[in-house]
Image: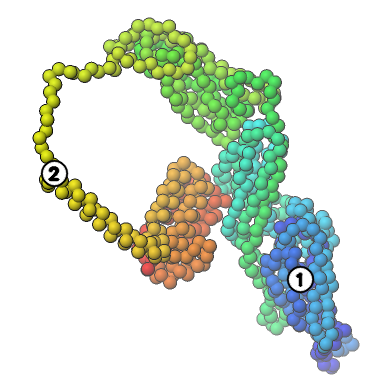
Amino acid sequence: MGGINMLRANNDNVSFKLSAPSVVEMNQQFKIEYTITNASPQISAPDLKDFVVLAGPSQSQSSSVYMTNGSYTRQSSLSITYILTPKKEGTFTISPSSFKLNGETIMSNATTIKVVPAGQNSAQHAQGQSNANGQSAATTAGNDVFIRTTFSKKTVYEQEELVATITLYHRGNVLEIEDAKMPEYKGFISKDIQLKREEQPGTDVVNGVKYQTFKLKQTILYPQKSGPIEIEKGQLTAIIQVPTGGQRRGFWGFDDIFNTMKRVRKIIPIEGTKIEVKALPSEGKPADFNNAVGSFKMESDISKTETKAYEPITIKVKISGTGNIKYVKSPTFEFPSDFDTYPPKENQKVNGNSGTREIDYLVIPRHAGTFEIPAATFSYFDLNTRKYNTLKTKAFTLNVEKGDNNTDNSQVISNYTNKENVKFLGKEIRYINANNTSVEKSEKNIYGSLGFWLWYIIPLLLFIVLVILYRKQIKENANVALVKNKRANKQAKKRLKKADTYLQSGESELFYEEVLKALWGYVSDKLSIPLSQLNKETIEEELTNRKVEDDTIQSFMDILRTCEFARFAKSDSQNSMDDLYNQTVDVIGKLEEQVRK
């Protein structure tokens, strides 16, 4: 039986090939692969100046045995892989790479890659192109994770609500969201919708590929001006898994390939867009129109129409409907000028863009008489009819009798200028008693007395004490690390106090953000490590070196992870936020006791 022909320096059997997609999207992650057969050389570094190298070079090897005419031949293959993302749009060429073999230069082919704007579906451009694993360019790592922002409407009127939803699409390889810069929606009044946990995950099919989805943020927007408004771009950083292309030999000695995975950071863009905002029509616009847009109804009532002077009465107005109800101005009543009036008290029950507003107007008549309170008006632009509507409250007649106090309750004729405060000056003037007055001359001289000397000695002593304290403070301030260490707990308490304010008002995203700032700021000051050099691994290692208990370290890291996730996967449970706040206070207290200087 013939023996195995071992590979020698036969350049005719060697090949060197570069495989890459022909079209990729901006910010897409993709793979290029060099394949060398029957050689294991060191290749020259490829020119990748037009791309960001996210991972690589990673190598994998395989071999196979063929039998020809009773003789066995082994063929080997070496793959060198890079994971890239483009820097800008355009068409770019990756020039050939090379290596030396038996004095001869072996070169790979060159390749051209076209970078198109994000969202132009590189799968269609690259149809038929395959990578080394037989997958189309659309199914490579670059399209395994992306973000879409959808809008309920792209053309609206001023003050008309629209909903923006930012959704993460992925195929199971997103491990962690590390940082995010969400669009600020300039030119809009915005209100985030508290998403329930069961509403956030889902699935969707894009270009025939099934993705898992996760709603990161949903916001109600009210445009404040007409014309095109640009929604700015954003981005977030995610930790994802990508294959390294590594391998190990199987148990029985065959070359079984086991793909290993590597954690890489990827910046995922959030694309901007343009919203067309139409101006509200000027024709038929009522004089009292205050930017209310939607569909509304109004009810009104008064607590009593028969009363006495200096007894309060309340007018109640209820506005309900859909639209920008949270931001509309309350109707204005014209009360008689001799009524004491107070700022209206409002109670809102608004969910999204619908709900009710109840307004209480408290007034106190100061004189007896019969008074007319004209109807108040509320105008809005109806999106259904594209016309302005005006609603009116009831008009009220109020009969006021004399009060039971000693104030003059004579009847007055009222006019309807707005609020005017009338004072009873005759009852407020008090006279000075000029009888039985005398003036005495004091003969006492303070010079040379005990009080005279104390007047000089006490300030001198205080000055000396202040100088000593000031010198001590300067000395301590010279030690920056000591100052930061001392202020760590104080600064954390300030942050947590602010977080508690957000907790009480139910602003979960701001609450989690403030708790994160408190934790990161505390360890930065306490451990004397700049924020720019801090990460979870550094914190855990440093706390271990400072002999902090394992349970305390674990609690601290758990709170960090919970806050980072909750900023995008918001919890609708007030109890969970209360528990997290208490855990944070507890863990900072433990760190104060356990961190060794």
Number of marks in picture: 2
- 408, above or below 281, in the image: above
Categorize mark 1 by other alpha carbons within 10 Å: few (<14), some (14-19), many (20+): few
| Secondary element at image label 1 | loop
Residue 339, percent from left and from top: 41, 15
Residue at x 66%, y 32% (from the top left corner): 158
Closer to us: 426 or 94: 426
Could you say whether the residue bearing mark 2 is in a helix, strand or loop?
Answer: loop
Q: Residue at 60% of width from left, 42% of height from top?
A: 219
**Residue sitting at x 85%, y 83%:** 13
> As shown in the figure, which amino acid type bears the numbered disc 1?
Asp
Q: Give the quarter of the image for residue 253.
A: bottom right
| Mark 2 neighbour density, 10 Å: few (under 14) some (14–19) many (20 or more) | few
Separation (CA) of disc 2 from disc 1: 93 Å
| Dot placed on the residue nearer the N-terminal end, 2 or 1 | 1
- x%, y% of residue 372? 47, 10
- Quarter holding the N terminus is bottom right
Q: Give the residue drawn at x 12%, y 23%.
A: 438
Front one among 486 and 476: 476
Residue type for callout 2: Tyr
Residue 146 makes an appearance in the image: yes
Residue 168 in percent (x, y) is at 65, 52
Give the side of residue 377 with respect to residue 450, left or right: right
Residue bearing mark 2: 447
Height in image: 556 above or below 261? above
Q: What number is the disc on residue 47? A: 1
From the viewer's perspective, is 345 left or right of 61? left
**Residue 78: x and y, percent?**
76, 78
